[in-house]
Image (tube, grey):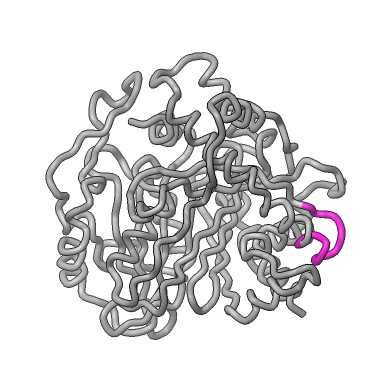
Amino acid sequence: MPPLDAWLHRHQSSGAVCMTVALLARFAGPAPTPDGLRSLVEKRWSGYDRLRLTVGGAAHPAWPRWTSGVWPDPVRHVVGPEEGAQDGPAEERVARLLARPLGPERPPWRLHLLPGAGGEDGFALLLRAHHALLDGRSLLALVRDLLDGPVGPVPPPAYGTVGPARRRRLHALSDLLPRARPLPFHGPVDTHRAVAWRRVTGAELDAARNALPSGRASANAVFLAGAAGALRAAEATGRLPSLPGVCAMVPVDVRPPGEAAVLGNHYATVRVPLPVAGGPRRRLAATDGFTRRAALRERARAQALAVAAAPRRHGPVTDALGRYVDSPLYASVLCSSLAERSGPLALGAAGLTGLSLLPPLSPGHPLALTMTRDTAGATLAVITDHGRRALAGRLAALLRDEIRGLGR
């Protein structure tokens, strides 16, 4: 396995935490039959060799490896409503599936058909995978490939020109410095999950982006500024919230141009300070200014190259480094965003009404926030473990209120 895949695989194989990543697609309209959905999956996904991979070798090899097999059984991998967890509200059903590990005995992905999870007259599809197999952009590419609609432009690369090797190493090393501090919600992650999501319209998001007199802010800056305000309002930043050391770990896609649909793990992370002090517009100005730095894109690319070149073996130094990167000293909270803006999408006669990225939690980090944009707006999601479940709904509502408040 590439080093990033192996690192994500080891989290679960060591028993540290479930590494199921998911994308929820909600629809208004009639649901497909399970057999119809299986037929569509075979037609449109069978060319993806990544979906044939299983973990080879012993149960706990010194270094795991991928092996490719035949196309998996569609009945076992495309799960109909009679086979899934169907009782309770949509959030609870999704949370139960998010907490369910995907083992190595067959390709670690499943597509679930969830009637009623898209609203009274709709349904949802939940694509789950082991994070070692697929990242968030991979999930989006697969779901997009199932749907009908306009073909959007290939997004630009998330990085610029990479500097000389020496500068790349300096970027990678400097990004290891501590920038965070433990917060009240940090601690061991339990085996259950809670999920909550809220919706903001395109008009509300546009109004928030236009809140700065200096110019239009990025959607990601609005999300991060809203996350900072929501964490403070929820009293999740400690008794001294004005102290520095609250930062978001933000994944950055590093796929080259023309490879937006390449599956696997092709991302790096940057750390963005979350300004929890001051008013909403001050927080937005700070996050927008920081995230516009060209050096952040080069830093992400440098980190990706450094990780890809790492020796494929475990040792005391790499194990200690992994524990540090998972700790609250490295980052406070995962804040991840995706965007699907190619136009109205549909599955048969059912129109897509929203997408929601649901990442796994990492050791010591029982909380994650996401924003997933589409042409009509964005879905905000909060994922916690069971012990912090009260934070999920509260933070999702506060995040929505923060974004709406910016546009007023």
State which quadrant residue 124 falls in: bottom left
Start and end of the magenta stretch?
275-284
Q: Nearer the viewer, residue 354 or 338?
A: 338
Query: Relative to 227, is 304 above or below?
Result: above
Query: In screen coordinates, is 320 left or right of 136?
Result: right
State which quadrant residue 32 falls in: bottom left
Q: Quadrant of the N terminus?
A: top left
Query: Relative to 189, is 406 above or below?
Result: below
Query: In screen coordinates, is 4 left or right of 66?
Result: right
Across the whole image, how many numbered discs are drawn on residues? Answer: 0
Q: Residue at x 29, y 60 (%)?
A: 111
Asked whether residue 113 is in view, the answer is yes
Asked whether residue 128 is in view, the answer is no
- Is residue 277 one of those drawn in magenta? yes
Name the outermost residue toward the left.
70
- Is residue 39 one of those drawn in magenta? no
Name the outermost residue toward the top.
316
x and y, in percent, of residue 301 in the image: 52, 39
x and y, in percent, of residue 295 in the image: 64, 43
State which quadrant residue 128 falls in: bottom left
Query: In screen coordinates, is 167 left or right of 311?
Result: right
x and y, in percent, of residue 50 in the image: 26, 45
Query: Relative to 394, is 139 above or below?
Result: above
Q: Residue at x 79, y 68 (%)?
A: 214
Q: Nearer the viewer, residue 213 or 349?
A: 213
Q: Residue at x 43, y 43 (%)?
A: 19
Q: Nearer the viewer, residue 92 or 363?
A: 363
Q: Quadrant of the C terminus?
A: bottom right
x and y, in percent, of residue 82 in the image: 25, 67
Q: Nearer the viewer, residue 348 or 117?
A: 348
